[in-house]
Amino acid sequence: MNRISKFLTSSLVALSVASCGGSGELDSEPQAVLTEDQVATTENIDALVIATYSYLGNDHYTAPNYLWPTGNLRAGDAHKGGNGPSDIFAYHALSMYEPLVPDMESFPPDLIDLNNKKWTRNYTGISRANSALNVIQDTPADELATADEKSAELRFLRAVFYFDLKIHHKHIPWIDETMTQEEILATTNRDLTDQQLWDKIAADFRFASNNLPAVQQDVGRASSLSAKAYLAKTLLYQAYEQDELHNVVNINQQKLEEVVSLVDEIEASGEYGLYDDYAENFLAEFENGRESVFAIQRSLNDGSPDGRGAWSSALNAPMSGGFGCCGFHVPTENFVNAFKTDNSGLPRFSNFNESVYNVANDYVDPRLDHTVAMEGKPFKYDPDLIHGGDSWARAPGIYGNYTGMKDLEHPDCDCRGENGPFPIFSLNTVLVRYADVLLWKAEALIELDRWEEATPIINRLRARAAASTGRLNEASMYRIGTYDTFANKTEARQALRWERRVELGLEGHRFFDLVRWGVAKETIDEYLTTERGRKPYLEDAAFTKNKHEYLPIPNQQINLSGGIYVQNPGY
């Protein structure tokens, strides 16, 4: 277990606030309460920093930081799964689009407001960062020699929380450590423009990149390189400038140039690289390796009541095979079909989805069997653990019986824990991996009309995929090739966007990619046209352009603001 995990429990205990003493007098002195003066030492400030890190891992399947509900369900890459539409209806609403409303708690039977819970958890993390930054500001310099470095870690984490809010809601209130309570109460989610909010997030990552070491002694802490990666990601999103109705109206070339420059710096450092085998990205024994740029550190048996495992994936294991529950996050046929390849091993761009994947007849990219478990094939490379088809699914008649594998481990893994019927794994949640970083550079180069420079990057990932069959099922017909050249920008862009889907499949990025590129409406409409015939529950699904690119501002937050927050268009 890394040092951050070891300190987690003691940090949370040190920062906890108990109720007043047992005398019953309302004016009695609070007991077990720590003042800022008491924690204003180097040791305790680091505990505050660690408590902010811990909130990344304090997620849950009702508000996950692994973005499978909002990134995969809305993109057409996965069905909700579980025991039908009413089983966590908020997930069903994401898949159907139109049931999304500002007050998700109004929906029975589970009354889970995923929208507001996610908002609240992100701002709780931001509050932790801001509180710690205030303590640093008030600490004498001779007691805190590493003020800039600690501030940089906190600003990095704050920006991670804000980035998540930004891609989900677009217009959000910016709260930082410089603001008084009165200023916070007067802040709205429209004080800053879309671009100004991106500037704020970029400024935090830029500060972190300038004030953190290139390599951290403690695994899991942010470094200058992970901050540069997040800065590149922020600038890439910001480059696709949107109007008030979420239409992409311009692609900022200067931002793209900086993306390329930042990734060049990351590459030149030599600190990161691709695993030789694609599989190693999704096995606990290889976590925190060279392809992990920044990850949520998961743990079990760490002294906390239920462990700090990946609760975000607690519902996603199959119903059989030694797991227990609950059959959520079911890959779609459209997603599986995207891995089909032609005789030359290249994607079948125009006809990939005409028929359902047939293992006996269709050539496929080997990354399919690293990503999706399906009937008759091994689960997580174990030839003795064969996917049982419908017996592994909870509602196969509604959603099918595929299983997403990347966020799950083998049921016999030492990284497995249990909470009732739910298997909880300590497999890290990687928020940024090196392959993603390389694809940002390739995307920026293509949009800069330098697609010849992007071609080797895409081919590098495809070559790695071709070499990643040693652990896989010999029954599959693997065929994957590389690109000789692209005739024009349109061809290069199509290849890049396809590569992102199959390389990063089910990792929670897809929907946000579609919105960034401004193609969500046409892509999802095309998906629904065919998928409705395969999965009748989608009959009434409808994506509304200029609305469903973002989630609504939670109704509860508008009420708590006194009505000064402005709702997103269409809601």
Image (cartoon, grey):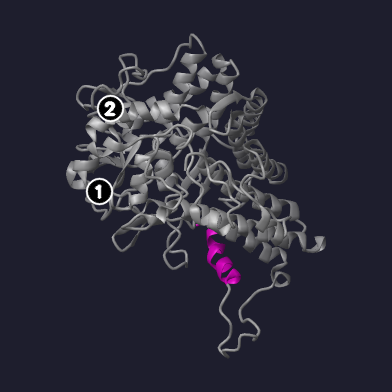
Residue tagged 1: 84
| Image x and y of residue 227, in percent | 63, 42
- Tell me, yes or no, whether the highlighted magenta stretch contains residue 7: yes
Is 181 left or right of 407, judged from the image as shown? right
Look at the picture and state if 424 lies above or below 44.
above
Q: Relative to the observer, which residue lies in front, 48 or 91?
A: 91
Residue placed furthest toward the bottom: 23
Is 58 left or right of 123, judged from the image as shown? left
Binning the other alpha carbons within 10 Å of mark 1 as few (below 14), some (14 to 19) or many (20 upward) gives: some
First of labels 1, 2 by sequence position: 1
Query: In this rendering, does residue 385 appear at all?
Result: yes
Q: Secondary structure at mark 1?
A: loop
- The part of the chain drawn in magenta is 1-16
Look at the picture and state if 344 lies above or below 64.
above
Binning the other alpha carbons within 10 Å of mark 2 as few (below 14), some (14 to 19) or many (20 upward) gives: some
Residue tagged 2: 530
Q: Relative to the observer, which residue lies in front, 184 or 61?
A: 184
- Type of the residue with mark 2: Thr
Q: Main secondary structure of the magenta part?
A: helix
| Image x and y of residue 180, in percent | 72, 60
Residue drawn at (45%, 47%), measured in percent from left and top?
Answer: 66
Query: In this rendering, does residue 435 appear at all?
Result: no
| Image x and y of residue 61, in percent | 40, 53
